[in-house]
Image: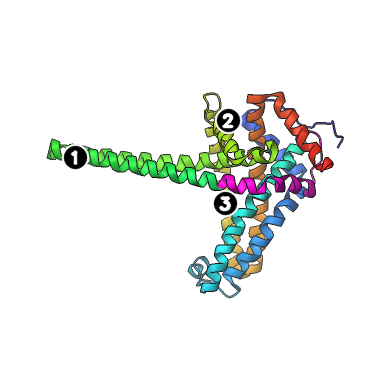
């Protein structure tokens, strides 16, 4: 692929076009993206096999889903969780860097994609910790508001007398449902903010605070917020369908063939396939948002990214 032969125009896309472009990119570069993510999911899969143990003779799903663990295994499982927390963003950034290379007509490869991702790895971990702090603060504020509102409703109900008890219960139920809706919506939006922030660190080489503020600004505006919600709902439907199908397939393998090795191997393959496409999809949407907001500035940034590994 020639250096100036850009296969994808930097133009605004519709939701359907974003999915179409993501499929095209992922299928045409599957081996590269699979190799990138194999470096992430293979060690995690091996650790999963160790924690679950030899399940060749296990047919009781309760024992599979809730295995007994020694104190040493609990400690190692905590290390596994931390390692996964550190590895997953690295793999996602590497895949996103590969998409960026494609946008400027470069052919992505594992080495250059990881070289780009590694430059921002520690900053992305800092960014994720910052997101966790902000999310915890927002949840604390929401919890405090719920408590205050419930106390006020209870006081008003007591003052109004028995006739208002039914209305008080209805209002509290509505508040509870609305709170759950806010939390679930917040989790979805946090996924998009996390992706946008990570890509900003990898591609724009920003610091965690600026990456968070830019991600929020790109999503929470009148022109983009509605599209962002629609994109998130489309992404969620894909994830739910893929997760249900993959869980069914992996469970069938375990219960029919009684092979933990095949179970873990299939899980790794599914994680690579689903996780890879999900990352490509969000990366394409990230570039689309930047094209809509910043136009030619994105093209210059992408060109700078594509030239960076060569000059490193």
> SS at mark 2?
helix
Whether residue 123 appears in magenta in the rendering, the answer is yes
Q: Position of residue 188 (x, y in %)?
A: 51, 41
Per the image, the residue denoted by label 3 is 243
Q: How many marks?
A: 3
Location of residue 50 in the rendering, given as x and y in whole percent from the top left corner: 61, 70
Q: Is residue 292 above or below residue 61?
A: above
Query: On the image, numbered disc 1 is attached to which residue?
Result: 155
- The label nearer to you, 3 versus 2, is 2
Dot 3 crowding, Cα within 10 Å, few <14, some 14–19, many 20+ = some
Looking at the rendered image, the disc whose residue lies closer to the viewer, 1 or 3, is 1
Residue 218, disc: 2
At horizontal 56% and vertical 34% (from top left) the residue drawn is: 213
Q: How did the renderer colour the structure?
A: rainbow
Which image quarter is the N terminus in?
A: top right
The span picked out in magenta is: 103-128
Q: What is the CA distance from the residue labelled 1 to the residue labelled 2?
A: 42 Å
Query: Considering only order in the chain, which callout, 2 or 3, is on the residue closer to the N terminus?
Result: 2
Label 2: how many residues lie within 10 Å, few (<14), some (14-19) or many (20+)? many
Q: Main secondary structure of the magenta part?
A: helix
Q: Position of 100 compared to 150: left or right?
A: right
Q: Find residue 95 and report its horizontal and vertical position in percent.
A: 70, 45
The foreground one among 87 and 245 is 87
| Quadrant in the picture for residue 170 | top left
Q: CA distance from mark 1 to mark 3?
A: 45 Å
Residue 83 colored in magenta in the image: no
Disc 3/disc 2 C-alpha distance (Å): 28 Å
Residue for point 66% across, 68% down: 261
Residue 183 numbered mark, or none: none
Tell me where residue 205 sits by quadrant: top right
Q: Between 70 and 270, which is closer to the camera in this rendering?
A: 70
């Amino acid at each position: 692929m020639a250096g100036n032969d850009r296969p994808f125009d930097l133009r605004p896309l519709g939701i359907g076009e974003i999915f179409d472009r993501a499929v095209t990119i992922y299928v045409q570069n599957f081996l590269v993206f699979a190799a990138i993510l194999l470096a992430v999911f293979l060690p995690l899969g091996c650790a999963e096999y160790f924690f679950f143990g030899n399940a060749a003779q296990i047919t009781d799903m309760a024992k599979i889903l809730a295995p007994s663990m020694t104190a040493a295994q609990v400690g190692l499982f905590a290390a596994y969780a931390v390692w996964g927390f550190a590895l997953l963003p690295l793999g996602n950034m590497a895949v996103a860097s590969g998409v960026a290379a494609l946008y400027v007509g470069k052919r992505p490869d594992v080495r250059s994609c990881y070289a780009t991702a590694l430059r921002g790895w520690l900053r992305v971990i800092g960014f994720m910790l910052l997101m966790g702090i902000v999310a915890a603060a927002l949840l604390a504020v929401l919890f405090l508001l719920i408590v205050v509102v419930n106390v006020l409703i209870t006081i008003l109900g007591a003052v109004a007398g028995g006739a208002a008890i039914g209305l008080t219960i209805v209002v509290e139920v509505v508040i509870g449902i609305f709170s759950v809706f806010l939390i679930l919506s917040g989790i979805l939006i946090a996924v998009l903010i996390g992706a946008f922030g990570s890509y900003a660190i990898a591609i724009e080489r920003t610091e965690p605070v600026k990456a968070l503020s830019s991600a929020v600004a790109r999503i929470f505006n009148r022109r983009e917020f509605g599209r962002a919600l629609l994109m998130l709902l489309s992404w969620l439907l894909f994830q739910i369908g893929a997760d249900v199908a993959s869980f069914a397939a992996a469970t069938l393998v375990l219960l029919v063939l009684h092979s933990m090795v095949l179970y873990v191997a299939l899980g790794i393959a599914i994680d690579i396939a689903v996780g890879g496409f999900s990352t490509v999809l969000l990366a394409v949407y990230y570039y689309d948002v930047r094209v809509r907001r910043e136009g030619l500035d994105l093209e210059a940034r992408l060109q700078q990214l594509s030239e960076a590994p060569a000059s490193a």
